[in-house]
């Protein structure tokens, strides 16, 4: 069952705490580089979410690395990691629209500041990696609406410009780019922080423009989200948000960036729209939500596209029943490698190559597409590379398609967003002679129990010594 408290963000923090998935940092941290350094280390260690209780010069606390591991995404959905894809597909067969509440019952309105009172300097907006062009709100869900295309929520990076101006760098294929280019000056946008983690998950995956990510989040949770009218713009926002930055497009653009991206490299300075902040509303003691980007692993790539991958598995299985799993590995920056897992008993001549090509219909930015058998754990990149090492003859099992579309911030591309694609059939083919080395299953299972017992005893002894 999904965790259905009345206060989804704070309930989830409490649940992480309870499960040993949250580390509280009591010492004051510096928002310049220091928050980033904490995040860097826990990212490298597959570590816990971080709760910064005190930030030098600010009154708010902050949370980072929320979805730094797939396990925590599964926790937010209330399932085990191996059940995630099927749970997502099942719940996303429908949508669940939010319910409106009035401002009195909306915690995000406990403190309301408008006009001259608005001051982004009160928010602990970090300076992240060396070379960033400014301070970045990195976990903001940007919410907007358009008279024809409807309502939308997407995560876009927001660079601080002044106490009442902020940027939003929105990729050409992302929805609110259409909104501000069409509406122009006055286009409304609210940047919301600290909301239902399932809305955060939904806003980070691509859906058709006709889909509203708040309805997607409602379906994932199984109960409608609570929304409330914004103060100064014609939008609805999550009533339980920690922080809401209400803005309007000024009609002006300026150079934004550089920013150290999820790829692990800086992207160049680019033009981005400037938004005037018309109100900031918060809880009485808000928690700022932060997301770390930088050289993978990083939390962005762990949860970005997670819903898309689950839906891609479902779509591929409809045409290719032999498919048993799909993922884009986070440790390889997510957007570059696609791994498809198959049941070898169902393979027919030519199917694997067709499947490799079909995967790029759903994931057009991929550079490498690899097919493996179902004895390979696709969530362990080394297992996939072991299959490539031992089951592939590069002269026979690999082919390249030149000059296809790729990601816009791949630092290796000769031409903007153009790449070739390498397809690798790393499944066992007819000539394959290998027999996988393993002790008997029954012995393995028996020893696992003994090993876990000894490890638990040792951990208990260590805790005893520490006290
Ligand atoms: C932490 C994080 C940061 C992101 N930053 C950006 C960004 O700066 N610009 C952008 O266009 N997309 C960014 N994305 C990707 C979009 O949020 C994602 O593709 C989303 O589906 C776009 O929603 P839309 O299609 O409704 O616009 C980011 C994703 C994550 C998870
Ligand atoms: Mn959208």
Image: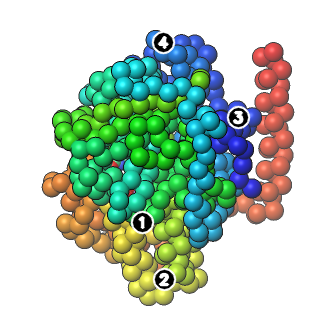
Q: Which residue is mark 4?
A: 56
Dot placed on the residue nearer the N-terminal end, 4 or 2: 4
Q: Nearer the viewer, mark 1 or mark 2?
A: 1
Left of 453 or right of it: where is 356?
Answer: left
Per the image, the residue denoted by label 1 is 210
- Identified at 35% across, 45% down, the residue is 188
Residue neighbourhood size for the residue with mark 3, other residues' Cα within 10 Å, grouped as few (<14), some (14–19), many (≥20): few
Nearer the observer, disc 1 or disc 4? 1
Residue extending farthest bottom: 349
Residue drawn at x 55%, y 22% as measured from the top left: 61
- The residues bearing labels 1 and 3 have C-alpha atoms spaced at a distance of 34 Å
- For the residue pair 242 and 386, the one nearer the viewer reads as 242
Nearer to me, 332 or 263: 263
Query: Where residue 115 sits in the image (x, y, percent)?
Result: 36, 25
In this figure, which residue is indicated by the disc labeled 3?
Answer: 14
Contact between marks 4 and 2 (CB within 8 A): the answer is no
Marked residue nearer the N-terminal end (1 or 3): 3
The x, y position of residue 458, in whole percent, is 80, 30
Residue closer to the observer: 393 or 82: 82
Q: Residue furthest left?
A: 415
Mark number, residue 319: 2
The image quadrant where one finds the C terminus is top right
Residue 383 against residue 358 in the figure, above or below: above
């Amino acid at each position: 069952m999904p965790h259905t408290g009345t206060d989804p963000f704070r309930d989830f923090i409490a649940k992480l705490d309870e499960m040993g998935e949250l580390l509280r940092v009591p010492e004051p941290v510096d928002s310049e580089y220091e928050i980033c350094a904490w995040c860097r280390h826990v990212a490298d260690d597959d570590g816990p979410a971080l709760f910064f209780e005190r930030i030098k010069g600010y009154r708010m606390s902050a949370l980072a690395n929320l979805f730094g591991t797939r396990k925590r995404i599964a926790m937010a959905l209330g399932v085990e990691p191996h059940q995630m894809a099927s749970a997502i597909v099942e719940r996303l067969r429908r949508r669940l629209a939010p319910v409106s509440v009035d401002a009195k019952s909306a915690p995000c309105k406990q403190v309301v500041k408008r006009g001259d009172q608005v001051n982004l300097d009160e928010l602990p907006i970090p300076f992240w990696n060396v070379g960033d062009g400014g301070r970045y709100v990195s976990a903001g869900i940007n919410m907007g609406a358009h008279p024809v295309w409807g309502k939308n929520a997407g995560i876009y990076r927001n660079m601080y410009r002044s106490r009442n101006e902020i940027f939003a760098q929105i990729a050409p294929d992302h929805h609110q780019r259409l909104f501000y280019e069409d509406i122009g000056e006055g286009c409304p946008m609210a940047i919301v922080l600290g909301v239902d983690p399932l809305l955060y998950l939904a806003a980070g995956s691509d859906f058709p423009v006709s889909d509203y990510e708040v309805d997607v989040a409602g379906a994932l949770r199984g109960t409608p989200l609570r929304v409330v009218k914004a103060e100064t713009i014609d939008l609805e926002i999550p009533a339980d948000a920690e922080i809401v930055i209400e803005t309007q497009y000024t009609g002006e653009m300026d150079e934004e960036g550089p920013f150290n991206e999820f790829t692990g490299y800086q992207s160049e300075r680019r033009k981005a729209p400037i938004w005037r902040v018309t109100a900031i509303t918060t809880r009485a003691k808000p928690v700022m939500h932060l997301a770390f980007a930088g050289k993978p692993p990083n939390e962005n790539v762990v949860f970005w596209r997670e819903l898309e991958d689950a839906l891609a598995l479902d779509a591929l299985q409809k045409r290719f029943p032999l498919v048993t799993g799909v993922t884009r590995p986070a440790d390889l920056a997510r957007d570059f490698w696609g791994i498809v897992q198959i049941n070898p008993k169902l393979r027919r001549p030519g199917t694997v190559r067709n499947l490799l090509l079909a995967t790029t219909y759903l994931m057009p930015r991929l550079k490498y597409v690899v097919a493996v058998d179902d004895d390979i754990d696709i969530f362990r990149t080394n297992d996939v590379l072991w299959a490539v090492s031992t089951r592939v003859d590069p002269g026979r099992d690999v082919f390249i398609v030149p000059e296809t579309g790729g990601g816009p911030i791949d630092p290796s591309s000769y031409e903007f967003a153009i790449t070739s694609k390498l397809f690798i059939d790393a499944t066992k083919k007819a000539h394959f002679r290998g027999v996988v080395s393993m002790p008997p299953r029954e012995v393995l299972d028996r020893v696992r129990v003994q090993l876990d017992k000894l490890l638990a005893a040792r951990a208990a002894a260590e805790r005893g010594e520490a006290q």
